[in-house]
Amino acid sequence: MNFLIEDRKTRIYWNPYFGGFLLGLILLFSFYMSGRGVGASGGIKSAVVATVNAVAPTHAENSAYFSKFLKGDKSPLNTWLVFQMLGVIAGAFFSGAINNRLKIRVQHSPKISPKTRLWFALLGGFLFGGGAQLARGCTSGGALSGFAANSLGGLIIMVSIFGSGYLFAYFFRKLWI
């Protein structure tokens, strides 16, 4: 079985099925070690709470949302999700460095400008981040970990994410082809 694939420019990437298999192993390891699945939005939320508390501590203490993360002497950054987030960033940097892909570039269709691509990416990021907060978890937490735990909610989230992605791809594919 070939675990690596080559694209048109002869760059070698992992086979996506092999990558999915490894992600499943990481998910099982996460359940075994911490009793919880993987997720990213919790780490971002902890970083935002710590930033707001550092910049405007009175506001953070009086806010119903921020104050529930500031209970006790424990820092909101002292959670495993923050360390997972930092590990993902460090791992991506390391992977880019050893594969000679550390370049700042904007990948976009010839039909749109780099500026338009960045605006769409920013809009998508805000929508996705807002949706993760409304859903009380991101795709990795809700879909992957929930589905792996045989949760009905995880199944609903997985079908909703991939179904809506498939439906919306029809409208946005014009930006790419």
Image (cartoon, rainbow, N blue to C red):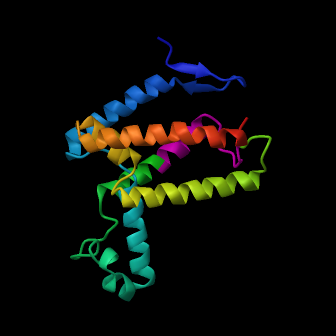
Residue 140 found in image quarter: top left
Q: Nearer the viewer, residue 88 or 173?
A: 173
Residue closest to the far bottom: 58
In the image, what residue occupies the spot 35% across and 56% down?
135
In the image, what residue occupies the spot 57% across and 54% down?
124
Residue 125 found in image quarter: bottom right
The spot of residue 174 in percent (x, y) is 71, 40
The spot of residue 16 in percent (x, y) is 50, 26
The spot of residue 65 in percent (x, y) is 32, 74
Is there any visible trace of residue 86 in the rendered image?
Answer: yes
Q: Quadrant of the C terminus?
A: top right
Residue 101 shown left or right of residue 114 in the figure: left
Q: Nearer the viewer, residue 78 or 156?
A: 156
Region rendered in magenta: 89-107
Residue 147 found in image quarter: top left
| Residue 3 is one of the magenta-drawn residues | no
Is there any visible trace of residue 145 in the rendered image?
Answer: no
Q: Nearer the viewer, residue 99 or 57?
A: 57
In the image, what residue occupies the spot 38% across and 72% down?
49
The spot of residue 79 in percent (x, y) is 29, 60
| Residue 99 is one of the magenta-drawn residues | yes
In the image, what residue occupies the spot 32% across and 68% down?
76
Q: Is residue 1 above or below residue 83?
A: above
Q: Is residue 66 above or below residue 127?
A: below
Residue 71 shown left or right of residue 164 in the figure: left
Q: Is residue 44 above or below residue 53?
A: above
